[in-house]
């Protein structure tokens, strides 16, 4: 019983232990707040990437694309673990708004709206056709016209200082011209000898807000067949750039991707003797994480760096606990001597100090975590208040594509932080505890030492 | 006697190994804050400098869908001013570049029509060219072949992609691209796409991802002829380099005056069109972004500063520990005649000394780390295969490694005072030790 009563008594009576607990609390508070916001940003960004591309992508970086995608799609559709699969063509184009003389280089993504919305969460990114994405390329003001979907950040002035986008009740009738270099299957210019380019007038039908800056600022979505025509991928042996796949519920990502890889290898082998089979060699099968690795990796690295920096600073807390315990144990020589003289073992004394350290660590960690949770719960309200009163935002929403500050606490992360704080407290207290437990009663209880 | 007491005091304090812990903690926090501050300010400074180098000091930007004709006369007027060293015209647009036969490589490009000779006076453009870097003559944009004599420069990112692991360009591939014939198409106001075939005369490598990734430079007259065939020589941007020592604010007023005069008399523009013309320093053009970076730096410094405040607690604990464990010694020296004030001051001085040594060490560590941050990054990349810095993510090929001495001073001074603050309460505790209470033997 003394193993619990004495630590509690020390904790309540010795004010210096409150200092140690406060140091732990401060460290935990900052780590909880920063890690929650950072984790939120990273996982939000990952989710956006996942929503944008689906679970698995069979595709090529080459702008020439690859053939026989329809046959592979048919293969895919035979398998139950594939919930949806949709072909996509990708290329670059020049977008011109008549009368303005303004050109902008864009990425063209040609999609079959129904299939693509089943394979990805594209429908959720639309504004006017969220509920009926099949009509996304039919402008509501004149369904007979060829429509297009533009990245939301390509529409100037649609975003206010608070980061909110504004739309009219109907899309505006905006005429746009898209110009592309059509390429042959060998990568040459398909219209060499003539005017080299394809051009087509399309009309703004909707906008897409994926939340991915580079996508929303430079992407135009066209109807699959139109895009394929413009980019020179139509013809006797039509080509596509990628197939986006969504797995059926319950399919594990790694297992699903593995199966698709095997299917693709078998498929490529079967078609090895066909015309343009060389294009199949450039095709890769990737999970969404690998496919978007280039965008996601920098954020993950920053997160890792931040964890390392906080770990370095956490060492200071370990030192504080070390010194506080050293001080307390130096002062409790008499108690140790008395305990040992009545038969308490060295291990039991060490346990006593371990319990004491765990108490300091737990109280500090819980206090810091609690304060962190309260702070996070109110962080957006505080930012709103600061913005209204002083025009101050943590991130200027006209510069960054960030909505609310992420404040969803991940309980696993919180548990890890609290656990790490308690362990840090134990680490800090271990050596002083060991030193205290090895004291001999005969030495500490002699009159000259009292 | 006092000297003996002082000697004893110094011996008690100086012999404490635990003081090294507080010195180490101060040094670590100090080094961390100096590194973070230096890297951030270096990054911000690099953005400002890159804008200066690429755009000149002041930029006159024509209103949307308008162009500046007779720009030679405007440039002459500007260069006649003492404030201005040189000016050059730019015609900008966007296009689509096909990188030659059989490559299947098409990419979106930003096009600038330039005059290489005058541009070299405004920006260090000639030094950024890979082939003509050390040439004595200004670079030219001519090619005598099947491209109708048209040659252009392209950013290094247009013809090559940095290695995924090392983030370095393959210069063999880059050099091989020089001389290649490429096609550039661009739209015009008349909705007729125009295609320009040109030879790559040189590759521009500025080390700034933004300017390397997709820029194509063509002769301004060729571009003007394609985009505005009926308007003759036109530009939509005038980039200006100021004379040495000229104040940007004063020069801005001078440029505005010259522009107003030119636009009214030579171009016959309305007051409204003149008002719509954007005349800013290149730094003003970056101001919004830079303000955000500065804000992020402030937040990071605040967070690390608060956590570093733990060092004050640590020093407090260590000094308090010394006072508690050395109460008898303090009582002895006090009984030898050292006053309470002297004992307190001694602890305080030790706090200062701890802070001074710690912050000095921190400055050295912070300086060495910041200066060698590129080697450290390379080492991590080689040892762990983890490339922390990529130009495509962080704009620059190299990590800016300039030490911010302003922040070094305030962080160093703050560390010294923080250490002294940590020692304050233990110093008071030491000063109030009563020898009669401590030294009695019962």
Image (cartoon, helix red, strand yellow):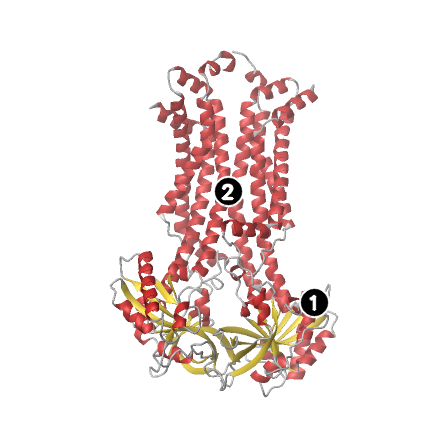
Picture quadrant where residue A256 is located: bottom left
Picture quadrant where residue B278 is located: bottom right
Q: Residues within 10 Å of mark 1 (few under 14, many from 20)?
A: few
| Depicted A391 relative to depicted B70: above or below | above
Q: Residues within 10 Å of mark 2 (few under 14, many from 20)?
A: some
Q: Which disc is residue B134 wearing?
A: 1
Picture quadrant where residue B319 is located: top right
| Depicted A233 relative to depicted A429: above or below | below
Which residue is denoted by mark 2 in the rendering?
A312
| Depicted B264 relative to depicted A377: above or below | below
Image location of residue B210, percent across then percent down: 55, 66
Instruction: Say which chain tag 1 marks.
Output: B
* Relative horizontal placement of residue B46, taking residue A197 as reference (left or right): right
Q: Which disc is residue B359 wearing?
A: none
Image location of residue A238, percent across then percent down: 36, 77
Image location of residue A89, percent across then percent down: 39, 73
Element under label 2? helix
Instruction: Say which chain tag 2 marks.
Output: A
């Amino acid at each position: 019983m003394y193993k619990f009563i004495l630590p509690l008594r020390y904790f309540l009576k010795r004010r210096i232990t409150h200092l140690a607990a406060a140091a732990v609390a401060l460290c935990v508070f900052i780590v909880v707040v920063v890690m929650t916001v950072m984790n939120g940003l990273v996982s939000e960004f990952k989710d956006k990437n996942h929503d944008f591309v689906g679970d698995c992508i069979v595709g090529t970086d080459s702008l020439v694309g690859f053939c026989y995608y329809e046959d592979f799609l048919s293969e895919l559709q035979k398998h139950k673990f594939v919930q949806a699969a949709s072909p996509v063509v990708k290329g670059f184009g020049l977008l011109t708004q008549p009368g303005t003389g303004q050109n902008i280089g864009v990425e063209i993504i040609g999609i079959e709206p129904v299939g693509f919305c089943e394979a990805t969460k594209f429908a959720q990114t639309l504004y006017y056709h969220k509920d009926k994405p099949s009509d996304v390329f039919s402008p509501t003001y004149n369904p007979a016209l060829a429509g297009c979907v533009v990245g939301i950040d390509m529409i100037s002035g649609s975003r206010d200082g608070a980061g909110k986008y504004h739309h009219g009740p109907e899309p505006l009738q905006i005429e746009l011209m898209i110009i592309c270099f059509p390429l042959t299957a060998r990568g040459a210019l398909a219209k060499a000898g003539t005017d080299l380019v394809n051009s087509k007038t399309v009309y703004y039908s909707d906008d897409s807000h994926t939340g991915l800056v580079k996508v929303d600022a430079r992407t135009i979505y066209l109807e699959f067949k139109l895009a394929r025509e413009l980019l020179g991928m139509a013809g006797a042996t039509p080509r596509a750039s990628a197939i986006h796949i969504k797995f059926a519920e319950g399919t594990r990502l790694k297992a699903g991707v593995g199966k698709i890889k095997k299917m693709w290898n078998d498929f490529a082998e079967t078609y090895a003797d066909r015309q343009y089979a060389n294009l199949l060699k450039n095709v890769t099968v990737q999970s969404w994480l690998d496919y978007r690795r280039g965008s996601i990796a920098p954020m993950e690295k920053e997160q890792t760096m931040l964890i390392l920096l906080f770990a370095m600073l956490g060492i200071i807390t370990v030192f504080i606990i070390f010194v506080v315990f050293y001080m307390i144990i130096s002062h409790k020589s008499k108690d140790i001597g008395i305990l040992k003289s009545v038969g308490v073992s060295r291990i039991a004394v060490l346990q006593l100090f371990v319990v004491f350290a765990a108490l300091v660590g737990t109280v500090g960690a819980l206090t810091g975590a609690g304060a962190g949770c309260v702070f996070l719960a109110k962080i957006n309200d505080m930012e709103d208040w600061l913005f209204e009163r002083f025009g101050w935002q943590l991130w200027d929403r006209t510069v960054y594509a960030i909505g609310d500050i992420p404040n969803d606490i991940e309980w696993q992360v919180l548990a890890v932080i609290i656990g790490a704080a308690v362990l840090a407290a134990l680490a800090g207290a271990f050596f002083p505890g060991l030193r205290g437990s090895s004291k001999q009663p005969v030495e500490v209880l002699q009159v000259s030492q009292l | 006697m006092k000297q003996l007491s002082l000697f004893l005091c110094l011996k008690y304090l100086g012999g404490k190994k635990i003081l090294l812990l507080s010195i180490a903690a101060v040094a670590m926090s100090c080094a961390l804050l100096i590194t973070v501050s230096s890297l951030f300010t270096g990054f911000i400074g690099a953005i400002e400098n890159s804008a200066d180098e690429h755009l000149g000091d002041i930029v006159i930007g024509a209103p949307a869908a308008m162009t500046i004709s007779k720009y030679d006369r405007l440039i002459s007027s500007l260069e006649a001013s003492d404030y201005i060293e040189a000016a050059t015209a730019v015609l900008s647009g966007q296009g689509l570049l096909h990188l030659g036969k059989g490559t299947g490589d098409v990419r979106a490009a930003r096009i600038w029509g330039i005059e290489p000779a005058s541009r070299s006076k405004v920006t260090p453009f000639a030094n950024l060219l890979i082939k003509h870097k050390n040439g004595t003559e200004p670079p030219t944009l001519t090619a005598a072949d099947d491209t109708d004599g048209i040659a252009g420069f392209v950013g290094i990112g247009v013809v090559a992609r940095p290695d995924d692991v090392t983030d370095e360009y393959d210069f063999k591939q880059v050099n091989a691209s020089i001389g290649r014939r490429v096609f550039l198409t661009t739209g015009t106001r008349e909705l007729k796409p125009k295609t320009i075939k040109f030879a790559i005369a040189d590759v521009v490598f500025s080390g700034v991802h933004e300017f390397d990734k997709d820029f194509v430079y063509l002769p301004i007259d060729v571009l003007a002829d394609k985009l505005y065939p009926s308007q003759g020589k036109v530009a939509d941007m005038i980039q200006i380099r100021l004379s040495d020592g000229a104040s940007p604010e004063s020069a801005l007023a001078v440029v505005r005056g010259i522009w107003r005069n030119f636009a009214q008399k030579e171009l016959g523009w309305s007051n409204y069109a003149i008002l719509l013309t954007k005349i800013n320093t290149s730094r003003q053009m970056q101001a919004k972004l830079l303000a955000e970076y500065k804000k992020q730096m402030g937040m990071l410094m605040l967070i690390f500063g608060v956590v570093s405040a733990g060092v004050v607690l640590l020093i407090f604990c260590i000094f308090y520990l010394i006072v508690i464990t050395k109460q008898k010694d303090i009582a002895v020296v006090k009984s030898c005649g050292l006053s309470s004030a002297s004992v307190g001051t001694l602890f305080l001085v030790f706090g200062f000394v701890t802070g001074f040594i710690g912050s000095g060490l921190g400055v050295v560590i912070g300086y060495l780390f910041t200066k060698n941050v590129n080697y450290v990054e390379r080492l991590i990349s080689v040892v762990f295969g983890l490339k922390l810095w990529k130009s495509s993510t962080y704009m620059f090929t190299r990590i800016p490694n300039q030490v911010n001495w302003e922040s070094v001073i305030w962080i160093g001074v703050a560390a010294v005072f923080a250490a002294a603050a940590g020692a304050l309460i233990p110093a008071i505790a030491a000063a109030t030790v009563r020898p009669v209470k401590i030294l009695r033997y019962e």
